[in-house]
Structures are given as C-alpha cells and as structure tokens.
Amino acid sequence: HIGYMNRTGSIFGLAYLAKVLPHLKRELGDRPYEVHIIGKGSVPSVLRDAFSPDNHVVIRGYVDNLDTEIEQADVMCLMNNAGPYLAAYTRHLVAWSNALCLVAHSRSQHAIPEIQHEVNALLSADPAEHARLIRQAVTDPQLNSTIRQNGYETFLKYFQPQTVADEVVTLVNNLTSGGR
C-alpha cells in the first residue's frame, strides 16, 4: 500500500518489501507471479528501482474497489510494522474479513496480540524468511486455506463491530468508575 509516506508505517513497509523482492525472485524462480502495490501515493525515489517490472512489481495506484482487487490475490502482504512505527493497521482486519492469506511482519503481533504465526497469519522479521513464507503460501493450498479460514474466524471472534464496541464501552465504564 502506498499511503501517506510522512504519516504512517507505509514507507517502512515498502522499504522492507524492497529487501524481500530479491529473495522472492529466488524463491519463486520461473513461476509466474506479480506483486501489486495499491494506493494513491507515490513510490519514494529511493525505492523506484526495486519496484520495477523486472522484479515482478505492478504499481496499481488508486483502485475504486479495494475488496474486489484483493480478493483476487493469493496472498496479502502487510509489512508496515517492519520499522520503528508500530500500529494495529486496519489492513490486518481487511485481510481477515476478506478471508485472505495474510503474510505480515512479525512485529504486528505486538500491535494485535490475536495474530498467531502459522494459525491466522504467516509472520517473519527476516526478508529471506518472508519470501519463503510467501512461496509456501502460494504453493501450499492447504496452508493457504488454513490461514484464510483461521484469519476469518479471528475477525469474527474479536473484531466484529459489536464486539469491539462492547469492549470500548467496558473500558470507558471502567475508566469513569475509577477502575471498579
């Protein structure tokens, strides 16, 4: 995702992706693949060479219907937590709510404790390992299906709007009642 480069972890995620791409090329070899980057922002000039078509990267820009676009993906990669900026990105929930196979940076677990490696996501902090996990996700249909299903179940259990609203109300009530 190319978002607001000066306000989010997008730049860190893109920089990490640039490190993953050469490993991914080795992992996938002659297998045809594309890495689609979506968002209305611009790729920083320092990363443009890494995101060339030679590296199987397609810069999509803004898309009208994100759900339709990502539902076609074998894997949704979310690497924004690769840098010092740590956040619980709604994109994690977008992946799970669309039953996508989420491959994310392992620091995402610090922001969203419900993320579990090899249960509802594939996680790594090493570019070579990240590429291996992506290859595994696109070549092992059972693993891909398991991650998709467990991610969707995680979304249903913890992140439905009513569930989140009830938790917020409980937290606010605890704060306003002095923690009682």
Image: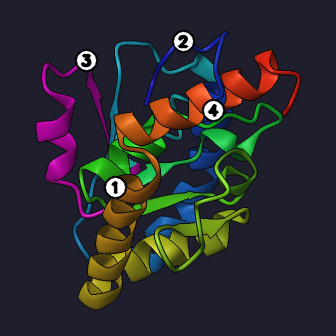
How far apart are the two marked residues, 1 and 2, measured between alpha carbons?
Answer: 29 Å
Q: Earlier in the sequence, mark 3 or mark 2?
A: 2
Q: Secondary structure at mark 3?
A: loop
Q: Nearer the viewer, mark 2 or mark 4?
A: 4
- Does residue 142 appear to the left or right of 15 in the view shown? left
Q: Earlier in the sequence, mark 3 or mark 4?
A: 3
How far apart are the two marked residues, 3 and 1, measured between alpha carbons?
Answer: 28 Å
Q: Give the camera-side residue of 6 and 52.
A: 6
Indicate whether 91 appears above or below 130.
Answer: above
Q: Secondary structure at mark 4?
A: helix
Give the labeled residue for mark 3: 62
Q: Nearer the viewer, mark 4 or mark 1?
A: 4
Give the labeled residue for mark 4: 170
Q: Earlier in the sequence, mark 3 or mark 1?
A: 3
Q: Earlier in the sequence, mark 2 or mark 4?
A: 2
Q: Residue at x 69, y 60 (%)?
A: 106
Q: Is residue 101 visible?
A: no
Q: Is residue 64 found inside the magenta-colored segment of the image? A: yes
Give the labeled residue for mark 1: 156
Q: Secondary structure at mark 2?
A: loop
Dot 4 alpha-carbon crowd within 10 angstroms: few under 14, some 14 to 19, many 20 or more: few
Give the labeled residue for mark 2: 4
> Which amino acid type is marked by label 3?
Tyr
> Which amino acid type is marked by label 4?
Thr
The segment highlighted magenta reads 55-75
Q: Give the camera-side residue of 160 and 49.
A: 160
The N terminus, quarter of image: top left
Q: Nearer the viewer, mark 1 or mark 2?
A: 1
How far apart are the two marked residues, 3 and 4, measured between alpha carbons?
Answer: 38 Å
Q: Residue at x 76, y 51 (%)?
A: 110
Indicate whether 134 appears above or below 18.
Answer: below
